[in-house]
Structure formats: structure tokens, C-alpha cells
Amino acid sequence: MTTSTTVFMAVGELSELVRTRQVSPVELTKIFLERLETLGPRFNAVVTVTGKLALEQAHRAEREIAAGTYRGPLHGLPYGAKDLLATSGGIPTSWGVASLRHRTFDYDATVIRRLRDAGAILCAKLAMVELAGGMGYRRPNAAFTGPGVNPWNTNTWSGGSSSGSGSAVCAGLVPFAIGSETWGSILNPANNCGVNGLRPTYGRVSRHGAMALCWSLDKIGPLCLNAEDCGLVLEAIAGADPLDPTTTDRKYQYRSRSSARPFKLGVIKDVTAGMDHAVRTNFEKALTVLKEVASIQEVEIPDLPYEEITRTILFAEATSAFEDFIESGQTAELVDQADRCSAYARLTILAKDYIRALRLRGIMAREIDRLMSQFDVLVGPSRPTPSTPLDEEVPSAVRGSARDVMGAIGNGAGLPAISVPNGFSEKGLPTGIQFMGRAYDENIIIAVACAYQRLTEWHLAHPPDLVS
């Protein structure tokens, strides 16, 4: 088996080879460590390669599997984690900030611990936008590791804030990665890099040991090579955690589903308004494909200020989360010059406006759940545009003509969504389609995504120069 075929194997495929001892966890880990070291800098994807720890975990996995102890589909598989998850053993956790690049913790984030318990092998801490975009970054270069580079076109952006996670999976630096999303930070790099990204239901995955950006919006989830892999990884990291009281007691087990009936999909009226031509075209083609397995109905959503609600909550909570950082003057050390002062403007958000946004969020959540009860999922483009040039400002619903209503609703109401590839632009850049479900319906959105991927091959495409 060649390196080029191994590095672009899905988790499900690799796990079977590891389980049956056709592939060694140690050799597999060495392959990915070498790629992280040699290719990682090309994409500004890596903060720290955890080589010593990775080889220790790989040897342990190999011994356990040889002795007949198999922990499940992630056992013996390498992965990378966004550098806002605490790691012990002297491995730094920088939150994407240069002044914190040597800061260490004496404990592991719950997600890191659960992946270790599943037998997964931590090979790298991956790059991210500084403070996960908590200061409202305007340019891709808002990271001390440099702007996230898209492996499909190195003059374009991998997406934020989980930039390294998107690039690393796309480039075959790791079989899967962990990212986080407050508003778009998993779906955005999944869209830009042509990979699969799952935003779980709020409270599905513990955030203990993760940098807090916005307490009532932050979520942690996987980026993978196909939709099914997202379910396998989510099963390992989901579950209640006494160290994070917002986590749910509902257990999650990934179950694949071959639909005995057509799915019912809803499309928000004018959901593609103002979006890039390729995004609209590929979305319409995807809907045509989905008609083989689903009925599709256009829907109108209640007239509410969705983006204003979620944005107000995000800005207010982020300013509070980073209060000490702001007051210490450390914002002056941020890479993005606009970020150095934007936090101070957000200090002017009034308490009454924040309370009003919380009240309206409750109304939004109830109204959207009532609408979504008629469907399996709502479907729309993952992002308004493909990847944009590194020297341009970050596309934003705040500043652009296209709205991100599904992003505002999904994150504001804490709903799960998965982004999967659905084609390319005329410039050869990936686009994505997202499936958003009701709370705790991860298996349903994954099932729809898997049904789409059985009918298409976009998720099997990889940057040509990284395959040979």
C-alpha cells in the first residue's frame, strides 16, 4: 500500500485495516508525522507537531490491538486538534495568539481525553485564527502562523477560524481533525477546502478545556474526508461531562441509515440570494441529485432579525470572555491591526440589547423548530462564496451582500449541521452544501449527507499534487 493511497483513506477504511492488523498504527503515525512536518508549513496548518506523544500512543495502540484489545474505529488512527484545546505534558496551547504560543496547561481538554480513551493518536495541534476570531478578524492573516492556505489553490484561504483543521484534512496531513464553531468556523473551512465538517448540537460535546469565545454559542466538532467519518468521530467525543454543565445527558451513538422512505428536505426561499454564481449553480445541481432520494419543498421562515440576534449575543459574550485579555492591553500584540481596537468598540453593547437578543433567540428557536418539525433537514449552501484570495478581506455577512441566515439560525439556536462538498467553481475551488437538522438529529443530517455522497463523488476529490 502506497503512502498516497493511505493518507486519503477514510476513517472507516483505515480502521478496518488497523483492526485486522494489515496496517500498523506505528507506521501509519510515522507517515502522517512526516507529512505534518514537511507539508504542514506549506499551508500554515500546524502550530505544534506532537511527535513524541504520538509515537508513544501509537506503540500503545499496536500492543493493545495485537493483544486482542480493540477500542473501536478510532483506535490507532492519527488526528490533529485545533490549538484552542488544552493539552498536558508540556504541549503548548496558543489559542492562535503569538504571545501565548508557549503557554501550557497541566490537564487535557475533555475532547482530547475522550479521543485518547478511544485509542486515537494526537499528532498535531493545528493552526487557527487568533482567539478563534473573537476580535472580529477582517483578514486571513490574523494568525501568528500565517494565513490559512487552501491546498486546492495556495493563493486562496482555507477558511477560519479552524483554518489548520480544514487544510490538514484536505492535504492528507491527518485522517481527521477537531475544530470548533461559534458561527461558521467548521462549515467555512469545510466549504473552502472541499472536506466534510460537522457542527454538533449545542451541548452535545463538552467544551471543558477549550478556549471560551461565546459560552452560549461555542461547539466542538470534527472535520473528515466523508460524512460517515464525522459520525464515527462524534460518537467518540460526545456525551455528558460534569466539568461542562451545558452538556446534555443524551447519549450519542452513530448509526448509519439507508432510508426506507424519501427524505423530506426544506429549502429556505431565496437562500442563495447574493451568493457567488458557482455556489448557486452547484447548489441547484445538488438539489437535482437529491431528488432521487428526497422530496424538496421551498419554505418561508418567520420574519425575525436572525443575524442581528446571533451577532449581538456573540459580540457581547466574546467581549466578556476576553475581558482580562482586553484590559491587559494584549490586544496590541495581535497580528490583525483591526482586531487590536475592535474589542473596545464592542464594550459599548448595552446590557438591555444583550437581554433583548436572548429573549428573541428563544422565540427564534421555537419558531424554527416548529418549521423544521415538517422536514428531516433544511438544506442550503455552506457558504456564500468559494475560497477567496489571501490578500482580500474575509467574506462576511456583516459586510457583504449575501446573508448567512442558516448560519445565524443554526448557531443561535444550537442546531447541528454538516457541510459536504458539492462541486467546484470555474477556478477549480470547492463549494459545499449544508444539511441542518433539529437539535440532537445528527444521525439524520449525516444520513442525508451519506445518501448524497452515494450518488456523487465530490468527497473523493483531492488536490492532484498531493495525491501522487
Image (cartoon, rainbow, N blue to C red):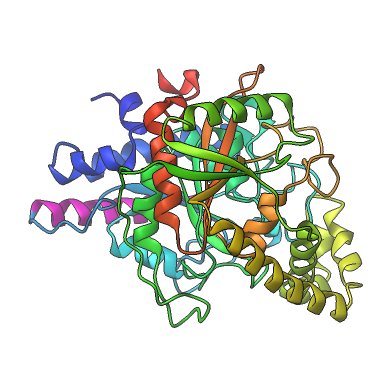
- Place of residue 336 in the rendered image (x, y in percent of width and height, measured from the top left): 81, 50
Q: Residue at x 70, y 71 (%)?
A: 363
Q: Residue at x 74, y 75 (%)?
A: 358
Can you say whether 460 is above or below 200 in the image?
Answer: above
Q: Residue at x 64, y 22 (%)?
A: 425
Task: Tell me if residue 441 is in the magenta stretch.
Answer: no
In the figure, is residue 105 to the left or right of 158? left
The answer to whether residue 38 is seen in the rendering is yes
Residue closest to the eye, 411 or 272: 272
Quadrant in which residue 345 is drawn: bottom right
Residue closest to the eye, 59 or 9: 9
Furthest-left residue in view? 67
User: Which contiguous range is marked in magenta?
Assistant: 47-66
In the figure, is residue 420 to the left or right of 101? left
Q: Name the dominant secondary structure of the magenta segment.
A: helix
Can you say whether 123 is above or below 344 in the image?
Answer: above
The answer to whether residue 89 is seen in the rendering is no
Tally of marks: 0
- Place of residue 214 in the rendered image (x, y in percent of width and height, measured from the top left): 67, 68
Q: Residue at x 84, y 41 (%)?
A: 400
Residue closest to the eye, 266 or 192: 266
- Place of residue 468 in the rendered image (x, y in percent of width and height, measured from the top left): 40, 17
Image quarter where the N terminus lies is top left
- Place of residue 13 in the rendered image (x, y in percent of width and height, measured from the top left): 26, 37
Task: Tell me if residue 56 is in the magenta stretch.
Answer: yes
In the figure, is residue 116 to the left or right of 282? left
Quadrant in which residue 310 is drawn: bottom right
Can you say whether 415 is above or below 384 in the image?
Answer: below
